[in-house]
Amino acid sequence: MAKPSDQEILARIDNEVTSALGYGDELSEQRRKALEYYLGQPFGNEVEGRSQVVDSTVMDTIEWIKPSLMRVFASGDEIAKVHAQGPEDVPYAEQAQDYINWVLSRQTDFFHVANTWFTDALLAKVGVVKVWWDDSDQWDRETYTGLSDTELESLLMSDNVEVLEHSQESTEDIIPVVTHDVVITRHTQKGRVRIENVPPEEFLISKDAKSVEDARFVCHRVKKTVTELREMGFEIDPDEIGKGDDFYTWSNEKSARHAFDRTGIWEDQNVDAEDALKEGWVYESYLRTDYDGDGIAELRRILTVGNQILENEPVDRRPFCTLCPIPIPHKFYGMSVADQVMVIQEVKSILLRNLLDNMYLQNSGRVAVQEGMVALDDLLTSRPGGIVRTKAPGAVQPLPTPPLEPYTFQMLGYMDSIREERSGMTKMSQGLDSNALTSHTSATQVAQVMTAAQQRVEMIARIFAETGVRDLVKQVFELAQKNEEKEKYIKLRGEWVEVRPDQWRDYMDCTVEVGLGHGNRDQQLLHISTMLNFASQAMSGGLSIVTEENLYNLGAKMIENMGFKDVQNYITKPQQQQGPSQEEQMAQMEMMNKQKELEIKAAEVQIKAQKMQQEAAEAQVDAQLKAQELALEAQQNRPVAVG
């Protein structure tokens, strides 16, 4: 099979884009409607002269759920957990865990990313973030004045410095002093993990997709200027950019987002724009296609603008992580929290409008007048103490306004109860129920009610943790492993720590810590305090089931649940006794061998000394015997043998 041409690829992408979910379809219209409800925009059925109040159920519900989610995922510095698969992987797993948490909490401003991500998911069915390794060039303009020759030479020694402007002045002293004014650009290229929110209208996915991983086509569509594309390294013709774009500049969703405070720019940005600021739609498409003709479709990243292909390269993953609060099985787009409560906002708005209209009529009701018997100007001017001139008694008769029935207010309460059941956000969980803490209500009962009310929110938090947030952690892990410098130092807990992503294992398991699940923080603190007391008593009693590290972990968890981030400022982690390194073990073995050799030599010397002593003693005995023989021979005048 022949390699497809650029025109065939462009036609394939154009077909995928126009048939994808989120491209001007019913889904886009539903998201626009949810956004307008969230912003409290009019429904379009308002009547002039009647109440036009709009209830804020959608915004209230979403904004009450968000604090619980943010407390779970963004209240501390430890979001991710990396689990080792064997004892030899423990140091690397701890290192990877520290690095990922550092990237999320310090390098990428995860709090603001998560806030927008969760809002998109709760409001627009699916929230999307894009995560990638950014190693783009950066040029910083710097200005220096009054530099000496030595300072100028030192400044220009770096290879990444380019001089833009230079001027020098010299004094009229006996020994002239030369100073330099210089403008330079400093080029830096330092890779880092980037995480960016993707607006719902900029994300496209094939209709038959069940997830990002199995999607045939995924695309990020965004407007970029000629300058931005040139900074990315692409040569763009300003006269060609924007050609072939069939999507209007502002989608209905984007228009609704900016119509709230009239901040939108409605005209075409390319009209009378200078060449460097002309805009065009850039499509970053991830498409499965058999590009090399081997009969197997591979994943490719294809970057296009207008009718031009800027990049076409194979990749191993799609850089998108998605969240959906209410998934529908076997389907990519599920339901949002806004979908559940929009009808409640509509019904409550109707009830409130009728209630206010009735109050207006009660205070300024309609009247029946006899034609020609009443001064209408007096009647139309309503003021305290005012008079109405009539020509006959009874010329003005008020028309009765039926009072509101009690069920109107009951209906408002009923709609609130439905909202609580659907969203899980009750008055008690919001701290608004004054009857929740009466004298006969025990703390256990309150805790049980609070826990039951939080189950819906806990479910959303668990879904987020096991889907998009976990995918984000895994992608950060993989990006660091493949792209980060071999040796990198990051500041953790007030100390500089070395990390080596190139030594991390591919099969280490990444998970996400979810703070909810066993009641609120007060309950968790109570449980931890109980465990801490038990552990302290067990340790003081001499039981070996508790170590200093166990006590430290309990204390650290208690401090985290109290809301403090820097645990090391309050308690110190006990030093672990580390075993000797391989070099130390070899040195110890060599020393032991030498010591054994010395012991053997000492034993040999001792044996020789003992042998010499024995030989000397034997020689002395022989000499004594010989002396005795000689003495006896002299006495007896004959040979004598002794011994």
Image: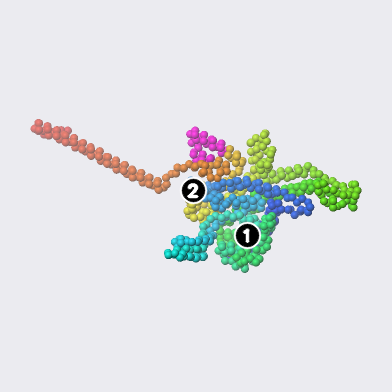
Please name whichever residue, 371 or 236, is drawn nearer the observer in this view of the structure: 371
Q: Which mark is residue 221?
A: 1
- Residue sitting farthest toward the left: 637
Residue 293 visible in the picture: no
Q: Residue 517: image x %, image y %?
A: 61, 42
Query: At which x and y percent is residue 154?
Result: 45, 61
Q: Is the magenta stretch mostly helix, strand or loop?
A: helix
Q: In the depicted view, which residue is nearer to us: 77 or 588?
A: 77
In contact (CB < 8 Å): disc 1 and disc 2: no
Relative to 42, 65 lies left or right? left
The residue wearing badge 2 is: 495
- Any part of residue 17 in sight: yes
- Residue 388 at what x, y percent from top left? 86, 49
Q: Which of 143 and 632 is in front in this view?
A: 143
Q: What residue is at 70 percent from the left and 48 percent from the top?
A: 57
Residue 38 at what x, y percent from top left? 69, 51
Q: Give the range drawn in magenta.
A: 527-555
Quadrant of the snapshot with the N terminus = bottom right
Q: Given the image, on which type of amino acid does mark 2 rest?
A: Glu
Alpha carbons under labels 1 and 2: distance apart: 42 Å
Residue projecting furthest to the top: 636
